[in-house]
Image: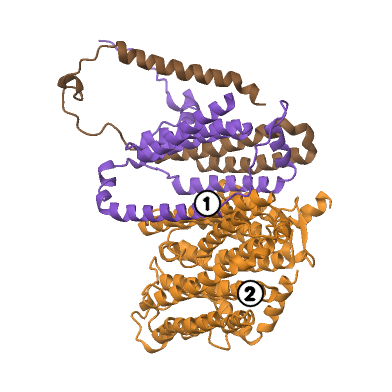
Amino acid sequence: MIEQTVFYFFAGLLLLAATMVITVKNPVHAALSLVLAFFCSAAIWLLLQAEFLAIVLILVYVGAVMVLFLFVIMMLDINLTVLREGFSRFLPVGISVAVLMAVSMGLVITSGRFTTGGNYEALKHAADYSNTRELGIALFTDYLYPFEIAGAILLLAIVAAISLTLRKRPDTKTPKVEKQVAVHRAGHVRLVRMEAEKE
Amino acid sequence: MLEHYIPILIFIVIGLGLGCVLFLLGYVLGPNRPDSEKNSPYECGFEAFEDARMKFDVRYYLIAILFIIFDLEIAFFFPWAVVIREIGMTGFWAMMIFLGVLTIGFVYEWRKGALEWE
Amino acid sequence: MTLTTELALLAPEIALLIMTSIVLVVDSLYDNPDRVLTYKLSQLALIITTGLVLLQFPEVSTHIMSGHFVSDPMSAILKIVLGLMTLIVFFYSYDYLLEHELLKGEYFILMLFAVLGMQIMISANSLLTVYLGLELLSLALYAMVAMNRTSAVATEAAMKYFVLGALASGMLLYGISMLYGVSGTLELPALATYLGAQTEANLLLVFGLVFIVVGLAFKLGAVPFHMWVPDVYQGSPTSVTLFIGTAPKIAAFAMAIRLLADGLQPLAGDWQGMLIVLAVLSMAGGNLIAISQSNIKRMLAYSTIAHVGFLMLGLISANQTGYASAMFYVIVYTLMSMGSFGMVILLGRNGHEADNLDDFKGLAERSPWFAFIMLILMFSMAGVPPFIGFWAKWFVIKEVIAAGHLWVAALAVIFSVVGAYYYLRIVKLMFFDKPVQMTAIKSSQEMRMVLSLNGLAILILGFMPGFLMTLCIEAMGF
């Protein structure tokens, strides 16, 4: 009973947040709605007893990917008026495509042939079941090879990101801390003995 | 398994409730008397010259994406640490290879100066 | 099977990853002038990995790494071809990159990563490894296209490629998840066993299949999922176009075989129809639009689309000889495509891209030898006997007729004749038109030699197609 209430709460919030992502006008607000959507889906995954995935979703997506999204939005400096210019012009085309797709989807779903073939009940695990443990065992035995490929993909991502965005700026003036620290008295200060002069 | 998460649920409920209540309280109790002067933007007595939001430098992007990559690496560590006693030497070395591959990436980004902020 | 023997079979991939890491570290540690060290080491990496494949050429099909990796004759042959092709790409692109001031160590490193991804795809035995290999390849290619950051065209091409590529990956992944949801297995042979045991049609399976075929068509660049091909071919630096236009086609073919033949063979009745539509549309669209192009890179892009149509024709018979003809086709096509883009690179110099058809005018006066090589390439692409391109088309059409699709075969012949027009137009430009500029062709000795060998290989193979065909049939026999 509690579970169902929690599910409907988060599922409803998820739908709301997802709708807001595509309807709100300010892109930063859209990104924040996406954060909420991620959070709600994490809660739903938790209800499905996929605790590790739920936490990774928050850790990686909310914690890192969304930060990146926000950076990119701020980097692009999106001009909303320009973005909305062609709206009324493309509206008829857009609506007709949308209607066409909705009708075809409706036809497929109501055809009666589109069934999943059964009623699936989510598996209930015992209280000492640990999703992280199960995942770990699968990942490091049966899925060892895909796991190592994932490592290679991450390495490639580092190389690609650096080669595409790193720009050396030779003209910037910044203090070189290591040089400042390594300064010795001998190279910079000369003591000169001067005769006292008489007035 | 789910019963372990009841405290978190209670925490979320209280957090959400408290957040809403505080907002509502401020909205209901606070005085609200706007006029045109109060609502106009203020910038040292002048009209605003330009939008206050500036473009971000692309370097932030690089930092963020490098962070994501190592964040993902950490994410793989959790299940590994949980099952390290059960997966044996193969599992141990699998993670070491994974770590080695990413360390090479780290050496590369260090040498390229991607971590420096000029 | 013990871990040591498993690792021995994985040796080419492991060696390539290690070598790539070494190149990465060396490139960032030593600031070598003109990246000569990086270049040589990358070549060495390719030679080592290809050598390792040759050393342990498998005679049987072995599934290792919990069924995620397969080592069979087809994978070995394709990996060797892949290694050789990429090596040729290295020869062609070095001078080009140097002249166009695009030379960076990352260029070669990304290429090695792409090769690693393709090797993984070629040897994939589970839906997961197909996808991961594909991502490794695609990610490297996106970065390579965007490498020239000062060029707006290249950035636009990279953007289009990335957005459409990500969409295609999403489609593929969605299809994979449906198949996994129904069958409960990611392994391709296990999936085939499961599907073979099904007696009634499962709508969800067919749904998953549609998404997988769409994803495949996107990656291959078949009409109507071809929109990215011309822009990417034209927009990226020619050396990158050269790479994208050749090696990934081999990997895409391997992916098609792994998914459709190894995993979804029992659903062949469903996917054959889809492939026929895609193939006919690709041949029609590619050949007809190519005629109106004035940019040779764009023209070759549409020609690629047409060739992809032909490649798919080889798959529709859904039997061993059909697959063998498609394999023959893809190997021959990459060889021809390599030579054609090599010619574009050869003619360009001093930062000038020779990517207009006009640049080929009067080539016979400027350099009779390379005009002859280009003549071989164009004749072979058009499918004129006795060049190898003719045999590739011949084997495919023979299989299509054997499978009973007479109309499809007739259409294939008609569109080949249409396609011959724009290939032969280049021959006409080279031999019967006055040159726009008379400057001599300047290029390194290496480049000239490899390009000549490339052209002559097409001529020589044309006289003895049986050898390659036997190899392909044997590769498919398992």
* Residue A116, disc: none
Residue displayed at 37% across by 57% down = C151
In the rendered image, residue C449, in percent from the top left (x then y), is placed at 56, 76
- The chain assigned the colour brown in the figure is B
Residue C105 visible somewhere in the drawing: no
* Residue carrying label 2: C317
Of mark 1 and mark 2, the one earlier in the sequence is: 1
Give whichever of C178, C215 is nearer the camera. Answer: C178
Residue displayed at 55% across by 53% down = A114
The residue marked by circle 2 belongs to what chain? C
Residue displayed at 54% across by 18% down = B11
In the rendered image, residue C75, in percent from the top left (x then y), is placed at 70, 64
- The chain assigned the colour purple in the figure is A
Give whichever of C172, C42 is nearer the camera. Answer: C172
* Residue carrying label 1: C170
In the rendered image, residue C217, in percent from the top left (x then y), is placed at 53, 63
